């Protein structure tokens, strides 16, 4: 392998599990979090030589300096997310700007900052979400930015070729730290599989998008066929 696997938002949840997968497979893994000590702690817990650095997507001007010391990159995963409930009736402009900056500007600036180090044989994977097509009260910002991820895949796959660009859109991941233990029977009943996606399901789908050399420009839903 000719480059590292960089996972932005790799200190918790799906990003952490994906970092652990690649580290255990013997890949050079660099994970990021907003807090340097936390990123380094999680990297040490994962082991296998994983490294951790500080990177704040809501401070786009600081992204290039944060990744300046990284070498060749085989795969870039943009997994950092924040949850939000922001209605039009009680619109929080500050929070909306924060979240939009994180996911649209921050994701794009990270790609820009690392583009000259992509090996050309790997991929960029963006995390979106199903609120883009399944909105709920308070999801205005979340639905808009996750729909924006689709547009980012379209343009980035053209601009970065031959580096592949895909996105993954998990539904409710039943055993994730956020959802575990919550009453989700109604959601389960709405799936065609009769069960929720798991962390392992979602990580394996992410690996597929990252590794399959013929998968490019794909926006993959992982939700059990939720209707």
Image (tube, helix red, strand yellow):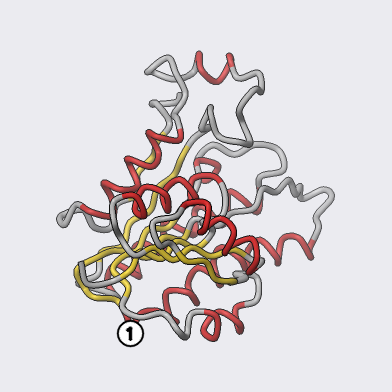
x, y (%) of residue 85?
73, 45
Specify whether 65 is left or right of 93. Answer: left
Specify whether 92 is left or right of 54. Answer: right
Does 181 sit above or below residue 73? above
Give the position of the C terminus as an image quadrant: top left
x, y (%) of residue 210?
28, 55
Specify whether 149 is left or right of 123. Answer: right
x, y (%) of residue 77?
41, 60
Q: Secondary structure at mark 1?
A: helix
- The foreground one among 35 and 224 is 35
The residue sitting at 41% across, 65% down in the picture is 6
Residue placed under numbered mark 1 in the picture: 116
Give residue 199's quadrant in the image: top left
Give the position of the N terminus as an image quadrant: bottom left
- The foreground one among 77 and 104 is 77
Crowd class of label 1 (few under 14; some 14 to 19; many from 20; radius 10 Å): few
Does 124 sit above or below residue 198? below
x, y (%) of residue 33?
59, 63
């Amino acid at each position: 392998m000719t480059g590292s696997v960089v996972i932005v938002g790799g200190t918790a949840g799906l990003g952490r599990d994906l970092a652990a997968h690649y580290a255990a497979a013997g890949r050079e893994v660099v994970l990021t979090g907003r807090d340097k000590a936390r990123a380094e702690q999680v990297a040490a817990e994962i082991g296998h030589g994983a490294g951790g650095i500080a990177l704040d997507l809501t401070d786009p001007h600081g992204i290039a300096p944060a990744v300046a010391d990284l070498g060749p990159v085989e795969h870039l995963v943009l997994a950092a997310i924040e949850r939000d409930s922001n209605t039009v009736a009680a619109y929080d402009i500050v929070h909306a700007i924060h979240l939009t900056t994180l996911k649209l500007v921050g994701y794009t600036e990270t790609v820009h900052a690392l583009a000259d180090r992509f090996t050309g044989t790997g991929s960029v994977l963006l995390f979106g979400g199903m609120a883009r097509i399944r909105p709920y009260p308070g999801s205005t910002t979340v639905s808009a930015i996750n729909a924006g991820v689709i547009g980012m895949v379209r343009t980035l796959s053209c601009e970065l070729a031959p580096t592949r660009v895909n996105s993954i859109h998990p539904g409710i991941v039943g055993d994730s730290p956020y959802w575990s233990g919550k009453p989700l029977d109604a959601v389960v009943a709405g799936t065609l599989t009769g069960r929720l996606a798991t962390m392992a399901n979602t990580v394996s789908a992410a690996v597929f998008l990252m590794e399959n050399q013929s998968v490019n420009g794909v926006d993959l839903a992982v939700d059990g066929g939720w209707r």
